[in-house]
Image (tube, grey):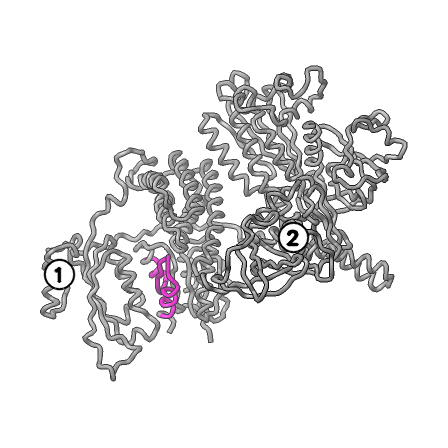
Amino acid sequence: MGKTVLIVDDSESIREVVNFTLENEGYDVLVGIDGEDALQFLDGRHIDIIITDLHMPNLDGLGLIRKVREIETYKHIPILFLTTESQASKKMEAKQAGATGWIIKPFVPAKLLSAISRVLR
Amino acid sequence: MIDKFRAKFVEESLDNVQDLEESLLLLENDRADKEIIERIFRAMHSLKGGGAMFGFTDLSEFTHHLETVFDWVRNGKLAISDDLISLTFEAIDQIKHYLSVGDLEDEDEKKQANALTNKVKRFVSNPSEHDEVELTENVQSVEEEEDGSKSYFIKFVPHTDILRNGTNPLFLLDDLHDLGTAHVIYNDTKAPLYDAFDPVSCYVSWIIILNTEEAINEIQDVFIFVEDECDLEITEVFEGNILEQKDFQDLLESCKESGETISSEILKNVQPATAKEEPKEANKKKGVQLKETKISSIRVASNKIDELVNLVSELVTIQAQLNLYAEKDGQPGIIALSENIQKLTRQLRDNAFEISLIPLQNDLMRFQRLVRDLSKELNKEIDFIIEGGDIELDKNIIEHLTDPLLHMIRNCIDHGIEMPDERITKGKSPKGTIIFRAYYEGASVIIKVIDDGKGIDPNFILKKAISKGLVTEDVELTRKEIFDLVFMSGFSTRENVSDLSGRGVGMDVVKRKIGAIRGEVSIDSEVDKGTTITLELPLTLSIIDGLLVEVAKKQYVIPISSIEKLYPLPEADRNKIFNEVISLGEEQFPVIDLQKVFKTPSTNEKQHIVQVKYENKKIGLIVDDVIGEYQTVVKPLGKLLKSQEIISGASIMGDGSISMVIDTNRLIHNNWIQKLNK
Amino acid sequence: MEGLPTTKISFKLQNQTYAIDSLKVRNILPFEDNITSVPNTETYVLGVINLHGNILPVVDMRMVLGIDEEEITRDTSIVIVSPEDKIETQFGIMVDLVHEVFEIEEDKVKPSPFTKGMGMIQHFEGTIQQKDQFIHLMDIMHLNSQLESKVIK
């Protein structure tokens, strides 16, 4: 059975690349265009992992993580950041907010997949 | 695979760039608007990330510097200055260039880009406490300041089961390579003999000596996922690049020979290193959260819309056939069905055409930019007011509208609006105004470009036209006719750009371009009050109200918009045509015999005159028969026949047959030119 | 690319056989008397047809090549070609008979005997011999550019 990945990014092209990469690997993919939009998927359904951008309108990646961690069902779900941001301070902040990992853009598909399988056991 | 998404990225980025320009113009008026600053930052960020992702390396690097600048701005470290705004506008043009050509190859272009990049960098090179950063030539750039690289010893011993959850340790090594230069030593001594070898176990460990400018936690972050699945040691061992030290190279050699493992302790002996650096204080400033309207639209490739419109027009055609059939058949059931389908088809058609309309808004940014840049350049002060930016037009019309409008607005700024002191002596506000006003009028869209500049004196136009030999001295023209002279080709040439308020410059080109999309242009002006140029445009190019006429047994469509009047032409009146001019009662106007134009065998069935407008004249087209009014879909004749001028397209009739749509302007123009040449 | 077979479609005009790249052919229609003439075009432009709601020009290949007219027969066909991959570039050529689809190997192509071209076609891609007949290879792009520059009177 395919694992379900929720990807959140405000850039359409990035969303498509990630979507394409993951669907090709047999993942079921849910797509949110920003943090706010992504919250609609957190309705109790089963999600294996969330991959989110950092800078987004409405609700940014950090805000999203904090919200996700408040929901009982998703308290322990792995959340990866997919971002160009490599500032250490941001990473710290992300870790504190409850992020599981960090993938730096640009990424090659293999790296993305590896990062995901690393946290999905 | 990435190539597939490149085009998408460019498309998306062009939207981003437009958003940037819009935001920047807003920012110019309200420099403290956090939301806008955040929007700019995000746009830069997306360009940087996507650029790197989709192979626009130069773009990514360039926007990286801009992103840093706006990161400073949003964190209050840098204030918005005129220089910064101007530079960002310049940068936006550069971004557009990157998006169209990708990475730069031309050396001159590279040089220019570098110069611009340096200008950008200067804004963040000097973290001054002042609100405005002074631009000085000798401020160092960011990268020149950061030259303190360090060397680290990293020992990475994965647990044997690390491969089982999909981790590829080599990616981690790649990540390290991204941070700087690395020397990697692998250790496979733990690997068992072949028989005991488990292919999904990891027996290898690595020692990496890394030289990087990044902080130690950058390195720690690389291993963020595998912390629990490996033994990891990261130690700073050297201030500077240890890899270049001779001592180090010697040490490597000797260890190789003796089989001794390199440790952080040994490396520290190479040269005493300084104590570990405390991680920089976390930047606690949270990103400002923005209220932004939800995406309520989706992006569709324009050729898909063209296809939809095509399919719908085909449906309309077939539906008309069905109607004919149903009426003939006479079965009430079928008639009712056909009527229902007709209703639905109409709605579908209206819908499809509405989809192919896009708002003028998208173009307005360029006009705002033009007003801003050009008025600065000319030291004029101009308010640019936009009314009706949400008016929608067929995308094919908008495509053809941009150039003429840019031209018109440029004329306003360049020649219409006076210099501030000149305006003051005239008793006007020193700030000039250009109004761009768009609104619907029936099935047309009206666009007016109104300035309050120096205006044009009609007497001057008349004199000019006479001296150019365009009209004779004894001619009597109405005010409108005089202004229309401006649109005649040959009215204005380059050398008199500056004298006649410049209005004549290229206005014939504007007229021609607007004519090509079945629009009309007129001008009115009052000396020292200003000038108004009015465009009247059809809503769509693909559907027209036409009059179906017959010439030599063939059907043609004449656009209703160009028709003035219909006259019957009884046999008795035919001898009133003399020298291709007809006298009907009070009226006298030239006529063109379509049988002659189409070179069909002459018949004696010429029974009607369709009088059409041409510039400020009325001209009669002699046709055999007038069949009636039709709303039709105009289709192109195909690329092969593109240079066919007098037919603007063709329309498929209810029975599947084809009627040519006549471009009356071209037809009259061509026939007159021919006549003049004779 | 050399030596690789390419697929061609051959057609006849009078007693000569010609062939064009099959990848450029979109459709083959039997000739019907439903062509609408377009004013002010050269005589070899027969007019336009309505193909699935698109308007496509049709040219008479015999006149393009300067061959005498043959009678319209049941075999007379219109080959719809597409020089570029866009519908607006498509047009039809009227030929006496569409012969066959066949493969040729590039290295079997010999120089064309029509060194000075024929009618509006200034050069042929080459000629191949098949059994006892010669097939003259025509480049649709060349035909297209020739027509485009001369189509309007």
Q: Which residues are magenta?
A: A92-117
Q: CA distance from mark 1 to mark 2?
A: 83 Å
Q: Chain of mark 2?
A: C
Residue B409 shows up from this direction: yes
Q: Tell me the number on the disc at residue B267.
A: 1
Between label 1 and label 2, give the one nearer the viewer: 2
Where residue B228 sits: x, y (%)?
28, 70
Where residue C109 sits: x, y (%)?
50, 60
Q: Is residue B411 above or below residue B243?
A: above
Task: Say which amino acid is labelled 1.
Answer: Leu
Residues behind callouts 1 and 2 on a single chain: no
**Residue in view at x 48 percent, y 69 percent:** A28
Where residue B176 sits: x, y (%)?
27, 60
The reply to whether the magenta stretch includes residue A100 is yes
Residue B78 shows up from this direction: no
For mark 1, does the 10 Å Cα neighbourhood hold few (<14), some (14 to 19), or many (20 or more) residues? many
Q: Is residue A117 left or right of residue B592?
A: left
Task: Say which amino acid is labelled 2.
Answer: Met
Please name the residue that numbered disc 2 is placed on. C61
Along the viewing direction, whichever of B591 and A49 lies nearer the viewer: B591
**Residue in view at x 41 percent, y 63 percent:** A51
For mark 2, does the 10 Å Cα neighbourhood hold few (<14), some (14 to 19), or many (20 or more) residues? many
Along the viewing direction, whichever of A25 and C94 lies nearer the viewer: C94
Q: Chain of mark 1?
A: B
Q: Secondary structure at mark 1?
A: helix
Q: Secondary structure at mark 2?
A: helix
